[in-house]
Amino acid sequence: MIKVTPIGRGLKILSKYFNRPGNPAHTTPNLRPGKPRRGPPSTRVLSHSVPPTLISRTGDYERYMAEVAPDEEVKLINATKSEDAYKKALEIAKGLNPSEASYLGLCLNYSVFLYEILGQTKRATSLAKEAFDSAVEPMSSMQGQSTAKGIFHQIRRNLIVWNSESGEGDTNLDGDS
């Protein structure tokens, strides 16, 4: 009997995702060694059909690796990989509803990465403010508590803290939904 390793399970899950009927990127990667693959990995894996949350998780992972990096060189490498993944995920997610939890979560994580890891406070604040402003109206009409509302409020709290730290003083954010 063949024992399936965690990596094997991951490959099996990816294979199921790419083999779904109706998947526009039906370029199934051949996950078995010794057989040729279809197309370069960048077009197979990072196509527009991959949900942005999967790419965002790569950014999250690389961000965490940058946080615990033993030296500046490794931190820079991980930060670069993280930023590339976040940019790609954000590009794909632009078509999502601005009040969707996956979009808000991506904006929250990317802005925290920009603020804490890269020290780019203006870019972080700008990204968070853009996500906040685009989600204010849909959030005000949303009933009850949801994951999206929790993320929305965390973005709001970050903006308040970041604005007070930078001395810009724009801590009056509407959207108390």
Image: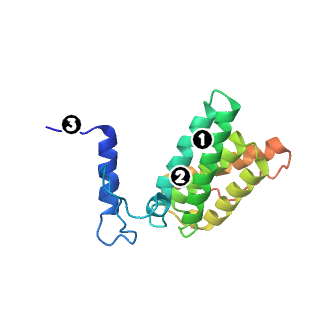
* Left or right: residue 59 compared with residue 25: right
Asked whether the beta carbons under mark 2 and mark 3 sit within 8 Å of each other, the answer is: no
Query: How far is mark 2 from mark 3, CA to CA?
Result: 31 Å
Amino acid at the residue labelled 1: Arg
* Front tag of 1 and 3: 3
Query: How far is mark 1 from mark 3, CA to CA?
Result: 32 Å
Amino acid at the residue labelled 3: Lys
Amino acid at the residue labelled 2: Ser
Where residue 33 is drawn, which disc sits there?
none
Find residue 52 and report its horizontal and vertical position in percent: 50, 59
Asked whether the viewer can see residue 97, the reply is yes
* Left or right: residue 37 compared with residue 105: left
Query: How far is mark 2 from mark 1, CA to CA?
Result: 10 Å
Who comes first in sequence, dot 2 or dot 3? Answer: 3
Q: Nearer the viewer, residue 7 or 22?
A: 7
Residue with the mark numbered 2:
56
Residue with the mark numbered 1:
63
Q: Nearer the viewer, residue 108 or 78?
A: 78
Residue count near mark 2 (Cα–Cα under 10 Å), binned few <14, some 14–19, many ≥20 = many
Q: Nearer the viewer, residue 145 or 85?
A: 85
Going 57% across and 56% down the picture, which residue do you hit? 104
**Residue lying farthest to the right in this orientation:** 167
Q: Quadrant of residue 106?
A: bottom right
Going 29% across and 44% down the picture, which residue do you hit? 9
Instruction: Classify 12 as above or below 78.
Output: below
Find residue 10 and report its horizontal and vertical position in percent: 34, 46
SS under mark 3: loop
Q: Quadrant of residue 76?
A: top right
Residue with the mark numbered 3:
3
Instruction: Classify 27 as above or below 61.
Output: below
